[in-house]
Image (cartoon, grey):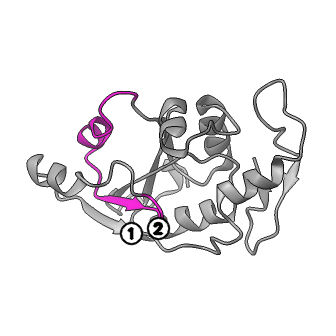
Amino acid sequence: MNQADKNTNQEERKVLIFGTFDLLHAGHESMIAQARVLGNYIIAIIARDDTVRKIKGNPSYNNEKQRAKNLKNSGLVDKVIIGSSGNKYDIIRKIRPDVIALGYDQFAFTLGLEKLIIDEKMSTHIHRLKAFKPQMYKSSIIRAGLSHQEPRSHGGINNDELLIEKPGAFTQVF
């Protein structure tokens, strides 16, 4: 949804989501759709490459710039920001979202969120989103299916190479 498409009488309600957003799939679409119910301006924070390696134990299929570009080009969110290499909470302090929407399986860096909100005197609500077919639409599962493919010299997949089945409009894995 573009700013121009929004109802000007409606107050902006910012929802912050976090993730690697590698190999976009129906689970990501569901996550973002759930976040959209919580507010009308979705800001996605893309995990830095070093953060992905630290948390997941291996690199993402696409680098942080490509992941940010793919998510932005998907049109699913209003703004995409590559996260911080330093203090992971700085972006929350800067944006001061109305809602922080966490994926069902997101636990890294979430332990101190409530304390941060209180300390910064924010009225931010934390909302845990529901899983969407996690046995099928989870990046680690999709990535495992790609392990049989030859590595790409450009460090990612061609956006037109992999389609997945799901109900809804978003069927391409970027």
Q: Is mark 1 on a helix, strand or loop?
A: strand
Name the residue nearer the viewer: 111 or 91: 111
Q: Is mark 2 on a helix, strand or loop?
A: loop
| Position of 34 relative to 140 (above/below) | below
Q: Which residue is drawn at 73% across and 62% down?
A: 170
Task: Report x, y in % for residue 139.
Answer: 66, 55
Labels 1 and 2 touching (C-beta < 8 A): yes
Task: Report x, y in % for residue 156.
Answer: 77, 34
The label on residue 104 is: 2
Task: Report x, y in % for residue 114.
Answer: 19, 58
| Left or right: where 85 falls relative to 168 | left
Name the residue nearer the viewer: 9 or 127: 127
Q: Which residue is drawn at 82% across and 46% down?
A: 147
Q: Which of marks 1 and 2 is nearer the N terminus?
A: 2
| Left or right: where 94 falls relative to 27 | left
**Residue matched to label 1:** 128
The label on residue 38 is: none
Task: Report x, y in % for residue 148.
Answer: 88, 47
* In the image, farthest residue toward the front: 57
All told, the count of numbered labels is 2
Residue range highlighted in magenta: 85-106
Task: Give the crowd class for mark 1: few <14, some 14-19, many >=20 residues within 10 Å.
Answer: some
Task: Give the crowd class for mark 2: few <14, some 14-19, many >=20 residues within 10 Å.
Answer: some
| Quarter of the rendering containing residue 99 | bottom left
| Left or right: where 88 falls relative to 139 | left
| Amino acid at dot 1 | Arg
Name the residue nearer the viewer: 44 or 164: 164
The quarter of the image holding the N terminus is bottom right
Is residue 100 in the magenta section?
A: yes
